[in-house]
Amino acid sequence: MGLNETVSAERLHIAFFGMRNAGKSSIVNAVTGQSLSLVSNVKGTTTDPVKKAMELLPLGPVVIIDTPGLDDEGELGKMRVEKAREVLSHTDIAVLVIDASVGRSALDCELTELFSDKKIPYITVYNKADLLSERIALKENELYASAVTLEGVNGIKEALGRFSKCRKNDKVIVSDLISRGDTVLLVVPIDQAAPKGRLILPQQMTIRDILDAHGIVITCQDTELRETLASLAKKPAMVITDSQAFGRVSKDTPKDIPLTSFSILMARYKGELDTLVHGAATLSRLKDGDRVLISEGCTHHRQCNDIGTVKLPEWIEKFTGVKPEFSFTSGGEFPSDLSRYALVVHCGGCMLNESEMRNRVKRCTDSGVPIVNYGVAIAQMNGILKRSLEVFPGVHEILK
């Protein structure tokens, strides 16, 4: 996929870290060939993470992130450092920039430990190598560079390229579950929450994946599902629905036709479906006053019948017969302390890259807090979770 086709969530996220005045921004500009970050000899010039989606050869579509110095001082400095650390949650590859004329600091060592703990691959760049009178041998994935002379810049790109090739690039949404020529019926309700003039990202990604597998895509609204099924000479290989219409679609789809949702497919695509299915059981154990966090990875204008803030709380209260206490977050906001929650209900995460979605799930499991996503939760509350997972044999076994 090219620059104009690849959304940020599907791009490789490369973040540059280091101390103030190590030359992070200068290295970022040298690697990208653009004046992406403001450069100055004054310490602390970069005050907030700077992000840019771009095409970077030989890696392809990426998101480059320049972060504030981790040795920033004062109250504002602490906030900036916290912002820089938050970037780790959606970093696929890290670049640690060290001032070669100063050497590695204790904070640099702490940062590499964080990379290792979070299993983030990284390279170490000793910038300002042009100021050194002598050099020592470096370890693997360490290199000298100079943002002034451009020494080592190609080496940085090559090292990033090696890491990117090690990442799994064989992920698919649904094409591994169908055969060439199969018809897949997509149910896409058009209601107040539907964006004007376009389809939401999971729907777009699913259509493209089916077409790449030489499948046939038929799309209808839930109100026309019965009519659409009756018009087909051959039954579809699968029906995929928006989660909000799960109950109605399940009733209208014959039992011999596999059924699942875009949200469940996205959970599998992001690699956390097993954990989310386990979390669904917590819905039946909620009690009055239990705190439930409903979190969305994107930010959008709230509709009067918004799924996250309106529909899900209503459905959960109806299903459980209790009155939980609901909290809501969106976009990059996600609590650092999850211990007070009995359950986290998360969106499909289509606008979050895989690293961030996995990080959020891990933070929940590390805190002992169950997490489920919209599609899995809605299927559970409609009594059709088992049916919606039949297309994934391994996951289906969890429910036995």
Image (cartoon, rainbow, N blue to C red):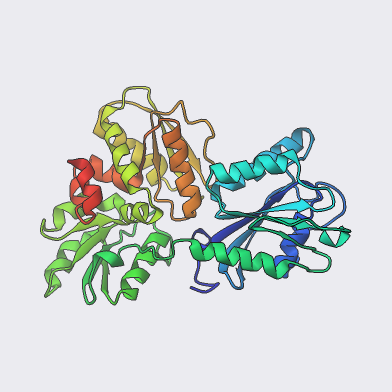
Q: Is residue 391 left or right of residue 345?
A: left
Q: Would you say residue 389 is visible in this rendering?
A: no
Q: Residue at x 42, y 66 (%)?
A: 198
Q: Quadrant of the C terminus?
A: top left
User: Is residue 96 or residue 201 the one in the foreground?
Assistant: 96
Q: Residue furthest front?
A: 137
Quarter of the rendering containing residue 312? top left
Position of 368 relative to 181 (above/below)? above
Task: Name the spot of residue 291 as percent of width and height, x first.
Answer: 41, 27
Left or right: residue 344 compared with residue 155: left
Q: Is residue 61 above or below residue 302?
A: below
Where does the image place residue 318, in percent across and percent down from the top left?
26, 33
130, 362: nearer the viewer:
130
Where is residue 256? Give x, y as percent: 10, 59
Check the image and name the residue furthest to the top: 288
Seen from the viewer's position, the closer of residues 159 and 21 is 159
State the residue at coordinates (50%, 68%). Answer: 6
Q: Is residue 397 left or right of residue 157?
A: left
Q: Nearer the viewer, residue 283 or 392?
A: 392
Q: Residue at x 54, y 72 (%)?
A: 4
* Res 23 seen here: yes
| Position above or below: 386 against 133 | above
Is the residue 73 above or below the residue 197 in the image?
above
Which image quadrant is residue 161 in? bottom right
Residue 331 image offset from top left, x and y in percent? 52, 47
How many marks can you see?
0
Q: Is residue 292 left or right of residue 318?
A: right
